[in-house]
Amino acid sequence: MKLLSSAAMLAMASIVSPEGVLAEQTVSFRFGGMEFETHIPDGYCLPRGRDIDVAQLRAAADDQNVTHLTLYRCQEAGVRRDYILIKTPNAALPLRLPRQSFLAGVGEAFDSGPLRSDLASGEMVRQVEDRVSSVIGREVDLTGSIRPLGRDDVCAYLGGTMQVSSSTLTYSVSLGTCITVVSNRVITINWYGPDNGSAGIADLLRHSRRLAEQIQARRAP
């Protein structure tokens, strides 16, 4: 199911330097004739300098989504394992539908069908692995799993932990994704963090839902 498959898109290996920039209070992005604005979470910053290059590579590696916004943990150096990506699946760009109708359909996809099969088989992970390796020009191995974690009145959730390995380094990163609808437009909030087990994934899911609830929309000029 292309609409959801790229929620499994995980971090490519990257070395970056700290920029020492301060987080701005709000940030906006536009798609589908709407302007969206949200508060930048405390401790996170827009990319600057080399971080912009890294963000562009991550976006290029994900050919299933439009990446609207990238936020990094301020002052974090080395391998980025604590960051936020706000995206819309390509297949969802033209969709206009109420949140509850969308979440009901996602819930059915979580319970059965190709999405669950692909997640269980690891097929999505292999596809992401191939795309990341192609974009950054070196082989990257991904292991682990991303799985459906239910839904509520705001989000359908995906989460899990992946191990990322290349010729130069190996690390783990966890993901908590909220798939939601704001002003009838589909948006995914993908919150990544260091591997802190199931409790860490639960925290990432709470963070992603909180950020989803803060997104405000108005018709773009």
Image (spheres, rainbow, N blue to C red):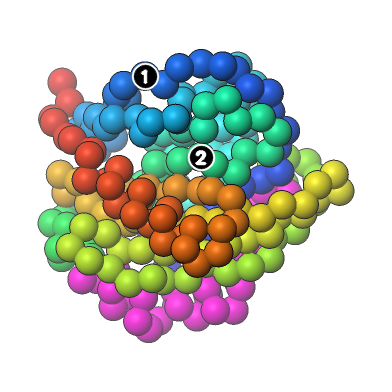
Instruction: Check if residue 15 falls in the magenta segment.
Output: no
Residue drawn at x 30%, y 64% is 156
First to last magenta residue range: 104-133
Which residue appears at 60% of the width and 44% of the height? 81
Instruction: Please determine whether, in this image, residue 115 is positioned above or below residue 62.
Output: below
Q: Secondary structure at mark 2?
A: strand
Q: Which residue is mark 1?
A: 24
Q: Quadrant of residue 26?
A: top left
Q: Who comes first in sequence, dot 2 or dot 1?
A: 1
Q: Nearer the viewer, residue 217 or 198?
A: 198
Q: For label 1, count other residues whose C-alpha is less than 10 Å away and answer few (under 14), some (14-19) or many (20+).
A: few
Query: Quick one: quadrant of the C terminus?
Result: top left
**Residue 91 in view (yes/no):** no
Q: Callout 2: few (<14), some (14-19), or many (20+) C-alpha neighbours within 10 Å?
A: many
Is 48 situated left or right of 168 in this image?
A: left
Which quadrant holds residue 69? Answer: top left
Q: Which residue in the protein does label 2 denote?
A: 83
The furthest residue to the right: 167
